[in-house]
Image (cartoon, grey):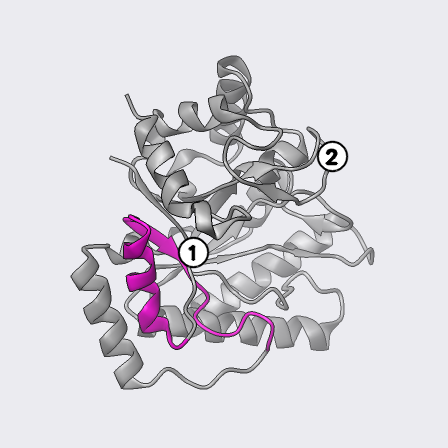
Amino acid sequence: MKYIGAHVSAAGGVENAPLNAQRIGANAFALFTKNQKQWAAPPLTAEHVLTFQANLAATGILPRHVLPHDSYLINVGHPEPELWEKSTRALREELERVEALGLDLLNFHPGTSLGVGSDDECLARIAAAIDRIHAETARATLVLENTAGQGSTVGWRFEQLAGIIGRVRDRSRVGVCLDTCHLFAAGYDLRSREAYEATMAEFDRLIGFSFLRGVHLNDAKVPFASRKDRHDSIGRGTIGLEAFSLLMNDPRFDAVPLVLETIDESRWAEEIALLRGMTA
């Protein structure tokens, strides 16, 4: 069975996100647990937590099929110690919010070197942040999202994600989210069965499906291997429908949340139905 949803709004309170997911026919979803464009956020109240959990239970969506996303401001690969510290604290606070809600996962972009030093040094800083956050939190998993490779961002090659994971002490609390648009933009083809299988074999060889914790389902507005992050609606971009049909019929993706971040939220219910209709 596939668990499909979208990154839904939590406007008015995190407790509204499960209901917004239910309205589009989702059995999984993503959300921001705070304003993603600000560093600080008011703490979650007991009422927020209890109402979120009640609404989640009412929808029948399981905590393991919810994939929260952190703030876009965070960069735990930052080369400046003070800003690395600020990002690390912010990511820890986001993981604490996830744990308070009774959820299991927090998705984040690995980071960028900002062109200072080597990529390997950046990967080491990201792993150090993960280790510290693990030591200061209880149980939830930090989920590295593959990137499109824009600028000096890291995490666009499987080798880089593996390089982070390999440095982390507690690998039981680290995972990977595969974004289809980012894969395609980074040079991992998905458009035919042969290309799809080659990409997934490379992922399994370098990282392993045991680390897979989620997928962002996005078509792309950009050409293959462009290293630009531009999402499109399913079937309307440069990836095409075949890739999504292959993924929807791949049992390796049965247990994880599959989350739309496509550009037209008015089409999310239609896209979810389209994806469900692809399953054999």
The one of 242 and 254 positioned closer to us in this rendering: 242
**Viewer-side label of 2, 1:** 2
Magenta extent: 12-38
x 40%, y 74%: residue: 96
**Can you tell which mark lies on residue 170?**
1
Q: Position of residue 260 (x, y in %)?
A: 45, 46
Q: Nearer the viewer, residue 38 or 197?
A: 38
* Residue 275 placement (x, y as % from top left): 37, 33
Residue type of the residue flagged with mark 1: Asp
Residue receiving disc 2: 226
Q: Quadrant of the N terminus?
A: top left
Residue closest to the far front: 266
- Mark 2 secondary-structure assignment: loop
- Numbered label attached to residue 70: none
Q: Is residue 244 left or right of residue 127?
A: left
**Farthest-out residue, top:** 194
Identify the residue at image location x=60%, y=24%: 189
Magenta run includes residue 120? no
Name the quarter where the C terminus is drawn: top left
Of helix, strand and loop, which one carries label 1? loop
Q: Which residue appears at 65% of the width and 60% of the height? A: 125
Q: Earlier in the sequence, mark 2 or mark 1?
A: 1
Residue at 64% from the left image edge and 68% from the top image edge:
73
Residue 160: x and y in percent read 63, 42
How far apart are labels 2 and 1 at the CA level?
34 Å
Q: Is residue 18 magenta?
A: yes
